[in-house]
Image (cartoon, grey):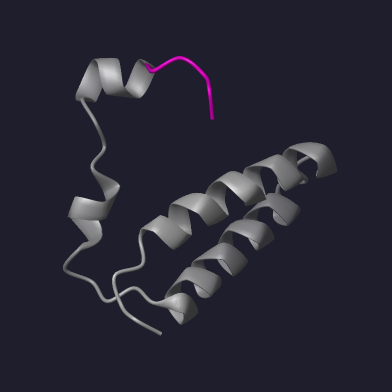
Amino acid sequence: MGGPQLYVEKYGHPRLRQRHIGFPIGIRERDEWMLCMTRAMQDTEVEPALQQELTQAFFKTADFMRNQPD
C-alpha cells in the first residue's frame, strides 16, 4: 500500500500466492475471506475512510490469490 518495506527487509518477500497454491481458492473463497476481513474491520471500528481503502487493497490481494476457474 505504499508504506515502508519493513516486513520484506526483515523476512523477505511474503510469497503469498506460492504459499497458498496448494489450497483451492476460487471466487467463493475470495468472497468469504473478504467477508471475514470486513467483519474484522467493523468489529475493531476501523474508520470508514481507512476501511474503504483497506477493502480495495484486500480485494486486489484476494483476487490475485485465486487459482481456480469459476
Does 26 sit above or below residue 2? below
**Residue at position x 31%, y 78% in the image:** 68
Q: Quadrant of residue 22?
A: bottom left
**Residue at position x 46%, y 14% in the image:** 4
As rendered, which of 43 and 60 lies closer to the eye? 60
Q: Please give the range of residues in magenta.
A: 1-5
**Residue at position x 26%, y 37% in the image:** 14
As rendered, which of 69 and 62 lies closer to the eye? 69
In the rendered image, residue 27, in percent from the top left (x then y), is placed at: 47, 77
In the rendered image, residue 67, in percent from the top left (x then y), is placed at: 29, 70
By secondary structure, the bulk of the magenta-drawn segment is best described as loop
Does 25 sit above or below residue 36? below
Direction right: furthest residue: 48
Does 37 sit above or below residue 56? below
As rendered, which of 35 and 25 lies closer to the eye? 25
Direction front: furthest residue: 69
In the rendered image, residue 57, in percent from the top left (x then y), is placed at: 57, 45
